[in-house]
Image: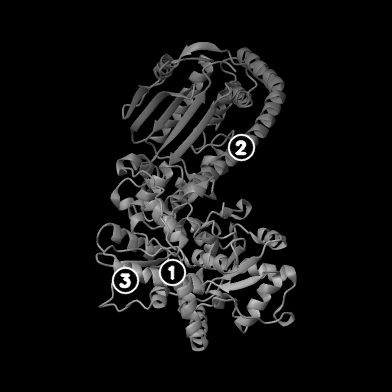
Amino acid sequence: MLVYTIKELCRTCYTCVRECPAKAIRIVGGQAEVIVERCIACGNCTMVCSQGAKVFLNTTDRVIKLLESKNKVAAIVAPSFPAEFSDIHDFWTLVGMIRAIGFDYVAEVSFGADLVAEKFKELISENKEYYISSDCPSIVNYIRFYHPNLVDNLAPVVSPMVAMSKVVREKYGKDTKVVFIGPCVAKKAESNEVDEAITFVELRELFTLKGIQPDNISPSDFDSPRGGRGAIFPVTRGLLQTANINDDTITGNIIAAEGRIDFQGALKEFEAGLIKNQHIELLCCEGCIMGPGLSKNGKQYSRRALVSDYARDKMLHLDQEEWIRNIKQFSELDLSIRHRPEDHRIDLLDENDVKDILVSMGKKTKKDQLDCGACGYESCVEHAFAIKKGLAEIEMCLPYTIEKLHKSVKDLALSNEKLSSMRLALKQSEKLAHMGQLSAGIAHELNNPLGVVIMYSNILLDECKPDDPVREDLKLVVEQAGRCKKIVAGLLNFARKNQVNHQLVNIRELVSHSLESLIVPGNIQVSTSDKTTNPEAMLDAEQMMQVLTNLIKNAFDAMPAGGKIDIILEDNLGDIAITVRDTGIGIKEEDRAKIFEPFFTTKGIGHGTGLGLATAYGIVKMHKGQIIAESNNDPSKGPTGTSFKIVLPRRKE
């Protein structure tokens, strides 16, 4: 595997997916994995990954072992070296440093580029076919994998690296081991003609490991044969310039494209027949001077200038006669190659095949398909295809993820609101529980002396003569003592001190009996709606009838000008629910938290004890149920009215 992921460094930014021309990155669990069989080893992902999660295979240890062997080892250096080693003031020093590592020979690949350029020039002048340059191994891999129909259009000429390795073995012996040093990751697996390949970055690592500095070595020149115009090979249109091919826009017949976007576009147009009577020179990077094997943060045009300056100086001092002799000497080498297709294309799907995936991402119509490219794919449909094939995840869609995040925020806000409401309800329940304990104590203490007062006041009233002036006073005492007895009974109910006599009750009949026990005013309409699947529940019929009559009476009082009362019976997750809803004046917001407190009433003096709802609350709690009140008294916020919902277990708990 030439390129791989350090998973603990991956931050799921999808930059590598976006920059990979072969879409050889699979996202699994938010982690980016390189798919080996799809990778063209261009190294784009290693250059764009800001976290250093994408790295290429380091082969410096292999080179060290090779140098420690008994074989002669030659280093062949790519002509883009001036773009990397601008800190070393002349190439003699660099060559001396490379020799100091342990290489027996140091040759320049620019001579191989000269040979390749001559072969390419002959090819396009002798044939009527139109060719695609084959010196970039990533381009060759891309065509073999993803445009197999164009393999026959690849120029049947080896790359400058392979050509130079053949030259070295021809000149220095067949057993000579060859190490390529250059800017390209794909060169590590391009050809068996080269024993090992390292990048310029790895070469710097070797300098550091061996303690080699520019000032502690002897400068040296490249070994023969030395290159000529091939020194310009790594820049844009370098092949054309090396071969002295007509590069005029009007009269020339060669198109040059570089970089992941341009080279893909050129190939698509060439395959579709839109480019006719034209050869194509392609580079996967923006020139070899911007390859992944160079140090990061280098500037393209300053690097280009460095290579151009070196090439210009080289041509000024080049021994033309020697160069021509060498070209003739090695021109008979077999530099041909036959490229074989290896189809790795993903089967194309119809948009209908991924319609369900698009809908799951919120893309129900064409208008919803933004094609923003944030996921790393050019279109939403292409992203959906990748998801279908297991190469991508839905969460890679930025608009979908943002929308999902907004929904989560809303849900969280709603949960917080419910939590706050529950906290207030719990606080209210705790408050009422304390009040219930207090009420129970008061009722218990009052019961005995109140019983004595009631008994003796009634005895005195019975014994009092009809014309006795104190008779009216005694009647008042008896009346008020009876009222006190009702209040104490209400307090006991609120405090849940009474027993619940559970019986199987038909709540439909319970509501009917409750209404029969009341006199319904003529200006009020009462309706009952039964939505239950089973109207029976284990309840204390007498106590629940008291609850319903209290609620209905309160509804009557809330609608002095008339209105409507709806009584709704329904199932509630296995429980039974009874709702009493009126269209009355509603309860003020500041009073809603106090409505179940004993003695709190909004009615006038003498019109209520304030124990009706407190008693209802106590009875419901004795049944292990809930009573929930909702009300609106502001006409600007909608219809006014109050709703009490009672939720009770169907079975005795």
Q: Residue furthest bottom?
A: 316
Question: Are there few (<14), some (14-19), or many (20+) residues within 10 Å of tag 2?
Answer: few
Where in the figure is residue 601, as x and y percent of width and height? 53, 36
Closer mark to the observer between disc 2 and disc 3: 3
Where in the figure is residue 488, as x and y percent of width and height? 63, 25
Q: Quadrant of the C terminus?
A: top right
Q: Secondary structure at mark 2?
A: helix
Residue 287 visible in this rendered orientation of the protein: no
Which of marks 1 and 3 precedes in the sequence?
A: 1
Please give left or right for residue 167 compared with residue 264 in the image: right
Question: Are there few (<14), some (14-19), or many (20+) residues within 10 Å of tag 3?
Answer: many
Three-letter amino acid code at disc 3?
Ile
Pointers 1 and 2 in contact (C-beta within 8 Å): no
Asked if residue 512 is positioned above or below residue 223 in the image, the reply reads: above
- Res 426 label: 2
**Residue 623 lies in what quarter of the image?**
top right
Q: Which residue lies at the image location 38% right of the left edge and 65% below the top edge? A: 133
Q: Secondary structure at mark 1?
A: helix
Q: Which residue is mark 3?
A: 254
Q: Which residue is mark 1?
A: 116
Closer mark to the observer between disc 3 and disc 1: 1
CA gap, disc 1 and disc 2: 85 Å
Q: How many marks?
A: 3
